[in-house]
Amino acid sequence: MSSNEIKYLNRSKQVIETELVYGDSAIKFVYDNPFGKLFSSIVASKPVSQLYGSYQDWPVSKNKVPPFVEKFDIDLSIYKAGSLTSAKKENSYNTFNEFFIREFEDGQRTFVDDKSKMPAFSEARYFGHEEVKDDVKLPVKGQYLRASDLLGGSKWSETFAEGPLLIARLCPVDYHRYHYPLSGKTLDSFPISGQYHSVNPLALKAKPEILIVNERRASILETQDFGKLAYIEVGAAMVGKIVQSHDETAAHQQGAEKGYFLFGGSTVILLGEKDKWAPSSDILENTEAGIETYLHLGEEVADLK
């Protein structure tokens, strides 16, 4: 297996799959090539990402949709059509961003109905740890993932010290809306300024501190059974915007949409209080082996202790 191949376990199929990476040559150039590394700070800057992201809102960008769907073998039958009338769904999106934030057709995803289990909040590839301590590292060369670093040193850092951790990585080909896993209310929310590096594993191998230096938005949620959660959306290279679509002054229901990422792959991180819950056993086992677990939105992602 090539060292640049990204393998993950597809839980629903129970098979190991190889990820087809969008923009892999560009990622390798910026993070692996000595000359390309000279441009990494420019590529990761907010203006560059927002400028490129804004192009995805231009009508001409819709021409990218059909070849993108074909190359990555995206099944559009499970998604709603765009705002344009067309015999082919791939031609119904007015812009690439409209396609990028496409919604599921009604009934395509359901949330697990068990108070002892947390449903997946994103359709994504997951890593998980029972406790975030200094000896917990990404399954690439050593970067600590302390709650205080992930939360930008906020007043909530101690609440989640040594608690459980879930990292959900969304690829550009994925559904890019993220949801509330449990019913509850928002206690606090705040931005954490930073850069816009790629969150692809190829980039993380070269720059493992990405998850704590990238632009982030954190929400502190209060839930009935799983306690407090820190819900952190991480920006990434060429992400035009992180959009909070739910009014955080109002209570939220399990499964409700929380927000979405405009163009670009990105990441959602979830922190919990110590000894409240743990990631699902297969996620823990796969994480130990350095393999992500691909879950559908709403599938079991964690269990109460």
Image: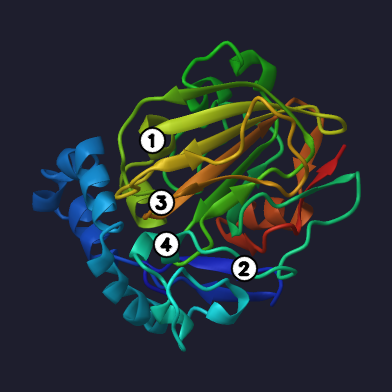
- Mark 1 and mark 4 lie on one chain; the one further toward the N terminus is 4
Badge 2 amino acid: Leu
What is the x, y in percent for residue 17? 54, 75
The reply to whether discs 4 and 3 touch (Cβ–Cβ < 8 Å) is no
Q: Which mark is residue 59?
A: none
Helix, strand or loop for disc 3: loop
Q: Are marks 1 and 4 in contact (CB under 8 Å)?
A: no
Q: Nearer the viewer, residue 297 or 203?
A: 297
Dividing the image into 4 quarters, which one contains the C terminus? Answer: top right
The vertical placement of 275 against 279, above or below, is above
Q: CA distance from mark 2 to mark 3?
A: 26 Å
Q: Nearer the viewer, residue 135 or 293?
A: 293
Mark-to-mark CA distance, 4 and 2: 29 Å
Few, some or many residues within 10 Å of mark 4 (<14, 14–19, 20+) = many
The earlier-in-sequence mark between 4 and 3 is: 4
Q: Is residue 82 above or below residue 228?
A: below
Residue in the picture at 36% in, 81% down: 66
Is label 1 or label 3 in front?
A: 3
Q: Tell me if 194 is positioned left or right of 227 in this view.
A: left
Instruction: Say which quadrant the N terminus sits in.
Output: bottom left
Instruction: Measuring from the top left, give residue 162's x and y in whole percent.
Output: 67, 25
Give the residue at mark 3: 262
For the residues marked 1 and 4, what is the alpha-carbon distance in whole angstroms? 31 Å
Q: Please tell me whether mark 1 or mark 4 is closer to you in this view.
A: 4
Q: Nearer the viewer, mark 4 or mark 3?
A: 4
Above or below 112: residue 70: below
Question: Label 1 belongs to which residue?
Answer: 209
Q: Would you say 17 lies left or right of 171 here?
A: right
Residue 10 image position (x, y, % from top left) = 63, 70
For mark 4, what is the residue?
98
Give me the disc on residue 9. Answer: 2
